[in-house]
Every structure is written in C-alpha cells, then in structure tokens.
C-alpha cells in the first residue's frame, strides 16, 4: 500500500467512523446473526494475493458489521462499561500507527512515563492516598472487583478491615 492509498483509505474509514458514531442508534443493539453465519461468508482458504482496501472495507460493512453487538449504542446496558469516546478512537489510531511495544521503560520511555503520570493524575482525581501505586488486573471483572473494594475502603476511611 502506498502512502497515497493509505491516506485515501484512512480518510474513507474516518468518515465512516464519524457517521457510525453519529448514527449508531440506527443499528440494532445486538448482533442479528445466527451462530456460524459470519464464518460461512468468509473464504475457506486464505487469499493468495492481497485484496483492495475497498473490497476489504466492503466485506467489513457487509459481513462483519451485521455480527457486531454495538457496545456504543445508547441502549446497550450489558456486561461492564466498555464505551470509548471519539478522542480515544483518535488515540487508538496514533497508538496503532506507532506500534509501540511498551512492556518496559527501555522499549518505550514515553509510554512508560505517560502511563505513570496518568496513574498519578488518577490518584489525585479519585482522592486516593498519595502512596497508592495502583495494580494491574487481568480483565474487566477483576478490575471491577478491585474498584468496588477500593471504593468500600475509601468510604469507610480505610477501616473496613480494622480489628
């Protein structure tokens, strides 16, 4: 893909994303497909050659989109709050462009230090003790439990487990 092809496709996709977010309530909240329906529309073997982005994007809209549960839909109230925002979508675009592997400071000082500062801001916004250093969870359920326990402790002035 040339830079010009990339620009053209990116502009088309950004226009589609903006239209999608502006009109999301026109989509059904829950996917309207039966099990196996999406897979049956996909080729049985990988393509030998790449396809044009127009064809890939058309497949996305015609095959993939009907099988999507629209978590951004104003009537979606299931599972856990997983909604994004337009600024977060733009940030994801930058993140994907940079393809940063941010597992340790040496692999991306900017990512490590930005994350550290965001956590410090979060501590301030949540009124947590300044010595709080956070914790990494493996999923939304554990994160939700951790948030509930933290809220309980804060509400009790950190005396819930006092003896």
Image (tube, rainbow, N blue to C red):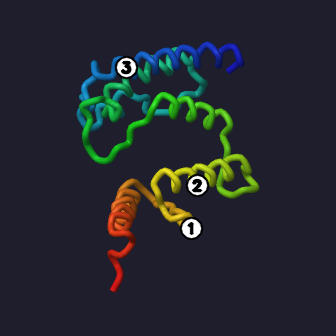
Kindly check if marks 2 and 1 are in contact, taking CB atoms under 8 A apart as contact.
Answer: no
Are there few (<14), some (14-19), or many (20+) residues within 10 Å of tag 2?
Answer: some
Residue 31, image quadrant:
top left
Give the distance between the C-alpha atoms of the residues marked 3 and 1, in whole angstroms: 51 Å
Question: Which of the pair 52/139 is nearer the observer?
Answer: 139
Residue at point 36% right, 57% down?
Answer: 144
Question: Which of the pair 124/47 is nearer the observer?
Answer: 124
- Residue 54, above or below 85: above
User: What residue did someone put label 1 on?
Assistant: 131
Q: Earlier in the sequence, mark 2 or mark 3?
A: 3
User: What residue did someone put label 3 on?
Assistant: 62
Q: Quadrant of the N terminus?
A: top right
66 relative position to 139: left or right: left
- Say what secondary structure mark 3 lies in: helix
Are there few (<14), some (14-19), or many (20+) residues within 10 Å of tag 1?
Answer: few
36 relative position to 138: left or right: left
Which labelled disc corresponds to residue 101?
A: none
Q: Nearer the viewer, mark 2 or mark 3?
A: 2
- Say what secondary structure mark 1 lies in: loop
Give the distance between the C-alpha atoms of the residues marked 2 and 3, in whole angstroms: 44 Å
Percent position of residue 56, x then y: 50, 21
Q: Earlier in the sequence, mark 3 or mark 1?
A: 3
């Amino acid at each position: 893909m040339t830079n010009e092809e990339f620009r053209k496709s990116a502009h088309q996709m950004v226009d589609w994303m903006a239209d999608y977010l502006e009109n999301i309530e026109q989509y059904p909240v829950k996917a309207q497909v039966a099990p196996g329906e999406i897979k049956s529309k996909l080729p049985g073997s990988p393509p030998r050659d790449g396809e044009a982005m127009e064809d890939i994007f058309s497949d996305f809209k015609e095959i993939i989109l009907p099988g999507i549960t629209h978590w951004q839909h104003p009537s979606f109230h299931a599972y856990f709050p997983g909604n994004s925002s337009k600024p977060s979508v733009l940030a994801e675009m930058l993140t994907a462009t940079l393809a940063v592997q941010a597992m340790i400071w040496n692999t991306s000082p900017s990512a490590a230090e930005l994350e550290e500062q965001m956590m410090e801001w979060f501590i301030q916004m949540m009124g947590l003790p300044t010595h709080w250093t956070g914790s990494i969870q493996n999923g939304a359920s554990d994160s939700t439990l951790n948030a509930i326990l933290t809220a309980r402790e804060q509400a009790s002035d950190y005396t819930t487990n006092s003896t």
